[in-house]
Amino acid sequence: MKLAFVNNLQQSAAEFKAMDAQDKRRSIADLLLNNAIYILLVIFVIYTWSRNNSFISTSSIVNVISLSAASLPIALGIGGCIVLTGTDLSAGRVVGLTAAISAALLQATDWGNKMFATLPEMPIPLVILLVILVGGIVGLVNGFFVAKFSLHPFIVTLATQLIVYGLILEFYMLNGNNGQPLSGLSDTYKNFITGALFRIPTGNGQSVAVPLYVLYAIILVAVMWFIWNKTTFGKNMFAVGSNPEAANVSGVNVFLTTVMVHTLAGCMYGIEGFIESARIQSNTANTGLNYECDAIAACVIGGVSFVGGTGKISGIVMGVFLLRIIFVALNFLSISGNMQYIIKGLIILIACSIDMRKYLVKK
Amino acid sequence: MKKVFALTMAAAMALSLAACGGTDSSASSTSTESAAESTASSVSEAATEATAAATDIKAGVFYYAYSDTYISSVRTALDADLEAAGISYTDYDGNSNQTTQNEQIDTALASGTNLLIVNLVTSGSSDAASSICDKASAAGVPVIFFNRAVEEDGKEGAVLGAYDNIAFVGTDAPEAGHMQGKMIGNYVLANYDAIDLNGDGTIQYAMFKGDAANVEAIYRTQYAVEDADAILTEAGKPALQYFDSSNADKFQLDLQGNWSAQAAQEYMQTNLSQYSEANGNMIELIICNNDNMAEGCISALNAAGYNLGDGQSKTIPVFGVDATDSAKQLIADGKMTGTIKQDAEGMAECISTLASNVAAGEDLLANTDSYTKDTANNLNNKIYIAYQEYAG
């Protein structure tokens, strides 16, 4: 494995040597351009660190990792929809709905204004299954309408976004809850999500805890990596994404693949909702609002192309990290949040331009 | 097969339409509408024959957003009050969009609504309010504004003084900030040494602002600190100090303007990765524009081992505004310190009184002498519902 990598390097080094001066310059420029985002990121991190040294400290790094872990599941889900040249606008609202359901079912039994006052403490695995199911059903509906009627996912998911929001508002009015926030979650639930996976000592007896949801995010990344790269379904997804007609001709069930990609995405939103609910600990009808924007941005920055058929799990993870690093760095630099929008916008623009450049060059 | 499917779809559609248009549903039932459409979401035909005049009144209640926690409380209370008064009404969700709300008002007026009860979306915009008043006066319909301000600060009377047959029921925007500031000042003074974790003699505070443009958010952010400082300096203590000396804003803002727990949680978690007791720069006091943000902060503090309410962990004082049910519970559990109650029932009751006046054919402002009014600007039709401190 390692040897192959070294061989590869040697080979490209040899190829590089064989080029003439002009080609050499072009290939270096290409290398720089293709990795511009990462180069900018490194510069940005170094700059932030030089202004505020605590940016690169154990507790700060743990903070970035846990913030990223929290927004990974939704990005992993939405990535598949983008590979199919689609999108999913309902993602944030599905997170909101599943967060509300998780919270309502897992409120502490002694909480004063429990939504379902007589409900005993529910087993956590059951609730997880339920929210995955709820998310999956919304995804199934999305996928079905996209595949069956060749509707653009933008339209279908816009519709389901509105429907799900209506359901959320209804849900918060249930049982005399009157739109009040759902909080007071049971300790078992809170510990299951935000409890310490392990603690890293930071000197003089202090330590910083890595929350458990980081572990769940890692598991999800591994599972999604396996699905995308090692299963027939994953290969079919890329085939449908790059050319549905060709995929159809070569025997791929385009209908089923589309439905399954959206359903899988929905399941991921369900997990995201389950995690968010306990992480924020106060859920309102606006929980999850606009989460899809950040998730789509993360995917696009990470090289999941809107052209379809390309994308890597590692890219999505990088994209999520990049957005979170910007958020944290601007806080450490005490820069007004308004700048965050500008920087995010610029990065998306640069990332997409670089991405499209590859296709333009090919043509 | 295809025909069967098409038929099922059509049937489902017809069913959902029928469900939405439910005529004699009780007031508490609400159906789910996308706010993009300007459709009614809860129709109540009050079947009371007691007041003959009341049956002639068709009130339209326009909320700025159903998703708002406090507004939900007002809606529940107002639905019940109007029902009790025998006034038929329809609720609308503006979904945080003034254009949507204007369209809903146009549609409602066209369909014969003869009393507008409006929770303006663009808080504190006299232009938005005037355009609604213009529509109403053209149709000869009275307007009751509530909750969100209808005039800019310093332009008092621009709307309320300019039209007949309108009223405003709300809160004095700066009052919550003043009251929160007073509460914080007194609390900090009483527990000064316990709060001052690093023993440097000053209290480092964090401030979370819900929305950049909302006047309530602006006043709360300003006065909560100013008034607390006034109390502290009077007692010979140094003023509060923002925890991050390089942040000129002296607050952290929910960029989406949602006053959300999520924004506060993520800011606070990030703050805690840099500011801690070990570094001697721990945040010693947290002030939030509302209770949702306070809950978000408490979630981040919990993760770092603070405010667990178990009597052993240290508690950083956290203050909010709204007195939501869950905030009250957190205060009871010792995880949160105080909040300012905005009286949803009181506001609903006052609006209902005004609506009943209209229904009974009396003057819009009859029977309101017991309420506090904006006497400073001589506006008899601007009614204030008082805030109250809540500390358990």
Image (spheres, helix red, strand yellow):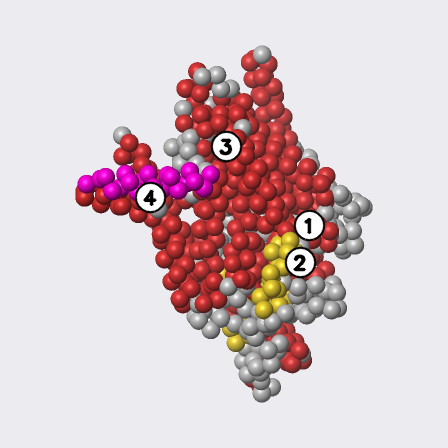
At 37% across and 49% down in the image, what residue appears?
A37
What is the distance, in whole Å, between disc 3 and disc 4 at their CAs? 23 Å
At 58% across and 66% down in the image, what residue appears?
A202
Residue at disc 1, secondary structure: helix
Residue at disc 4, secondary structure: helix
Dot 3 corresponds to which residue? Answer: A229
What is the distance, in whole Å, between disc 2 and disc 1 at their CAs? 26 Å
Marks 3, 1 in one chain? yes
Quadrant into which the C terminus of chain B falls: bottom right
Q: Which residues are magenta?
A: A1-20
What is the distance, in whole Å, between disc 2 and disc 3 at their CAs? 48 Å
> Dot 3, how many residues are within 10 Å of its Cα: few (below 14), some (14-19), or many (20+)?
some
Dot 4 corresponds to which residue? Answer: A34
Would residue B196 appear left or right of A40 to someone viewing this image? right
What is the distance, in whole Å, between disc 3 and disc 1 at their CAs? 30 Å
Dot 1 corresponds to which residue? Answer: A192
Dot in front, 3 or 1: 3
Q: Chain of mark 2?
A: B
